[in-house]
């Protein structure tokens, strides 16, 4: 199944370049009998059950092959004979000595991929590295390829097709004279960008969070659409949108969209340059460091952290208000990366389903805060004021990154949930709110710790229209000042005193006890959330 077999007359990559670009622990050489400078024109994913096709200057990927099988050694000999530049296997705990010996005898470079890396992700990395060297065609050729893909899908579906990047810019579109089209698509083609309408952004949120083809009905004057996300492994690269014919798209149309997404991913990856590949490597390394997978020394090596550097960690996330208005985190990460990389080329950026993390190797909290301010200002035009940033305490030991990440998550937990929270916050800004949230977590895990009288009081108020809970809370927040609390409630002081006495009689609240007052106040505050 050749994935990239177009020859190129110049700028060919080599096996050595692939190793240097991707590197350990994802890829390492097991046997390199003087063949690291062999040219590489593309990759081939091969099923061991099928005959091995000719593969001059190709890298052979072997999913499903066990390194200690006799068939593996036979395939090494066949790959060398058919002109392959290298062969990649996964050892999965096997010794692999016989395979290495056979590769050395045949003169074929044998590479081992990390067991935990998916073959799809590995192939995306290889194609990205090859693309950075111009393998597989020029940028113009790749652009023409996307237009050809859009026209091919349009011919099957019958409606206009647009291929977009993660910034919602139109990279290519179909141009069939009889295709079905609407005003929204025309505007997108003319401006080369999809209009930023809340309705559109919600559709992107749905699409990027889904697998396969997603159907969208006619709405706000826009014709029905079928769409799919372009991905390299789990990483989104863009989207494809097809206007449906009056009869719908059918099974052939869905298959055409799926094939188009797969091929479009290859075109996009081929045009990624070396700096983008470096960012992807750093992202993988940062995610591992935040999970505590590496030692301090390993983290410093993978992320190029200078010795003794003061590490700053930023977290970005969309506020709860943005629900329905803001597209998925992938869009936010893309926008932040465009701002941060030119300003701090030494930064590492990693995206999860909930947040974007930025590691700054030097500068401390002040530099992190300045960067956060600049980033939020830069993206405000596209994302409004719906993005929050968290600044973790600095550390000089990379082993502290998991703790810094936990603190960043804690800060974001508070700031994205409260509209009046600061847009850029540290722990000092949200300590009290975070403590209250943690108490709420504990009460959720251990409901027996709750005072039963508080729930009974809230239920009584709901069923009978009384105001016991709000009265107790007002009195507690006035630090026991009956006159002040009564004024806040707009009732007579005697009325409030009566309500407070009745809470003891009806619900067993002992408000004369300091510990009981604290417990009741915490539960009442949590009921307000």
Image: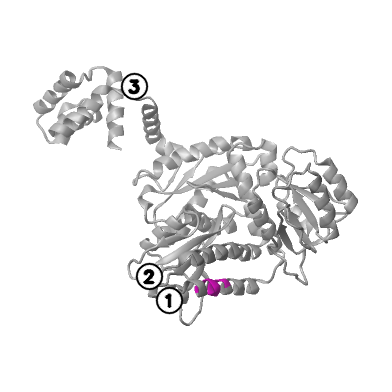
Q: How crowded is mark 2: few (under 14 residues within 10 Å), some or many (20 or more)?
A: many
Question: Residue at the spot x=48%, y=56% of the render?
Answer: 208
Given contact means CB atoms under 8 Å apart, are the residues at marks 3 and 2 in contact?
A: no
Left or right for 186, reference 42 = left
The answer to which of marks 3 and 1 sits earlier in the sequence is: 1
Q: Label 1: how many residues lie within 10 Å, few (<14), some (14-19) or many (20+)? A: some
**In the foreground, 367 or 462:** 462
How crowded pointer 3 is (Cα within 10 Å; few <14, some 14-19, many 20+) is rated as few
Assign a secondary structure to mark 2.
loop
Judge left or right: residue 122 versus residue 443: right
Residue 107 vs residue 430, the one in the foreground = 107
Which segment did they paint magenta? 149-154
Element under disc 3: helix
Specify the principal SS of the magenta part.
Answer: helix
- Residue 160's place in the image compared with 16, above or below, is below
Residue found at x 80% / y 64%: 56
Residue 502, visible in the rendered structure: yes
Residue 51 is inside the magenta segment:
no
Q: Coloring scheme of the render?
A: one colour
Closer to us: mark 3 or mark 2?
A: 2
Q: Is residue 427 above or below residue 337?
A: above
Viewer-nearest of discs 3 and 1: 1
Tell me, yes or no, whether the two marked residues, 3 and 1, touch with CB atoms within 8 Å.
no
Please tell me which residue is depicted at 26% across the width and 22% down the height of the picture. Answer: 452
- Identity of the residue furthest to the bottom in this view: 177
Q: Do the residues labelled 2 and 1 touch (CB within 8 Å)?
A: yes
Residue at mark 2? 223
Residue 164: where, in percent of width, then height?
Answer: 51, 66
Task: Report how far apart the C-alphas of labels 2 and 1 lie in the structure.
Answer: 9 Å
Which residue, given by chain and number where applicable, does mark 3 sit on?
A: 448
């Amino acid at each position: 199944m050749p994935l990239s077999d177009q020859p190129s007359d110049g700028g060919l990559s080599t096996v050595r370049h692939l190793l240097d670009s991707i590197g350990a622990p994802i890829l390492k050489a097991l046997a390199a009998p003087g063949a690291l400078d062999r040219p590489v024109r593309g990759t081939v994913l091969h099923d061991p059950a099928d005959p091995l096709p000719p593969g001059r200057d190709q890298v052979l990927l072997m999913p499903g092959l066990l390194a200690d099988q006799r068939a593996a050694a036979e395939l090494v000999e066949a790959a060398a004979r058919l002109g392959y530049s290298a062969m990649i296997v996964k050892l999965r705990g096997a010794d692999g000595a016989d395979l290495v010996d056979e590769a050395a005898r045949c003169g074929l470079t044998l590479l081992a991929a990390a067991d935990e890396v998916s073959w799809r992700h590995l192939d995306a990395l290889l194609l990205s590295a090859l693309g950075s060297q111009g393998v597989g065609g020029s940028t113009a050729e790749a652009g023409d390829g996307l237009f050809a893909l859009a026209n091919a899908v349009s011919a099957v579906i019958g409606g206009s097709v647009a291929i977009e990047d993660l910034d919602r810019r139109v990279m290519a579109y179909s141009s069939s004279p009889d295709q079905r089209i609407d005003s929204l698509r025309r505007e997108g083609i003319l401006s080369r960008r999809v209009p930023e309408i809340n309705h559109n952004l919600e559709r992107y949120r749905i699409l990027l969070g889904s697998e396969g083809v997603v159907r969208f009905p006619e709405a706000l004057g826009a014709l029905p659409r079928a769409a799919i996300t372009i991905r390299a492994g789990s990483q989104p690269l863009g989207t494809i949108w097809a206007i449906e014919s009056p009869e719908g798209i059918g099974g052939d149309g869905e298959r055409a969209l799926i094939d188009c997404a797969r091929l479009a991913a290859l075109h996009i990856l081929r045009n990624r340059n070396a700096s983008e590949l470096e960012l992807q490597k750093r992202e993988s390394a940062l995610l591992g460091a935040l999970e505590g997978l590496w030692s301090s020394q390993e983290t410093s090596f993978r992320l190029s952290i200078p010795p003794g550097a003061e590490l700053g960690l930023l977290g970005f996330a969309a506020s709860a208000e943005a629900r329905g208005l803001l597209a998925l985190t992938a869009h936010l990460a893309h926008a932040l990366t465009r701002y941060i990389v030119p300003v701090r080329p030494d930064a590492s950026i990693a995206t999860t389903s909930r947040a974007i993390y930025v590691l700054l190797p030097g500068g401390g909290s002040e530099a992190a805060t300045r960067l956060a301010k600049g980033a939020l200002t830069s993206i405000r035009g596209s994302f409004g004021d719906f993005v929050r940033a968290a600044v973790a305490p600095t550390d000089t030991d990379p082993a502290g990154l998991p703790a810094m990440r936990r603190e960043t998550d804690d800060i974001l937990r508070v700031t994205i949930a409260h509209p009046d929270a600061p847009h850029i916050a540290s722990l000092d800004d949200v300590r009290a709110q975070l403590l209250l949230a943690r108490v709420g977590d504990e009460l959720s895990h251990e409901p027996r710790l709750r005072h039963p009288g508080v729930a009974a009081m809230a239920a009584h108020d709901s069923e009978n229209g009384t105001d016991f809970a709000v009265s107790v809370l007002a009195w507690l927040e006035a630090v026991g000042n009956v006159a002040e609390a009564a004024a806040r409630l707009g009732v007579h002081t005697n009325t409030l005193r009566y309500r407070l006495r009745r809470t003891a009689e009806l619900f067993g609240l002992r408000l004369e006890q300091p510990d009981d007052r604290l417990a009741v106040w915490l539960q009442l505050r949590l009921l307000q959330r």
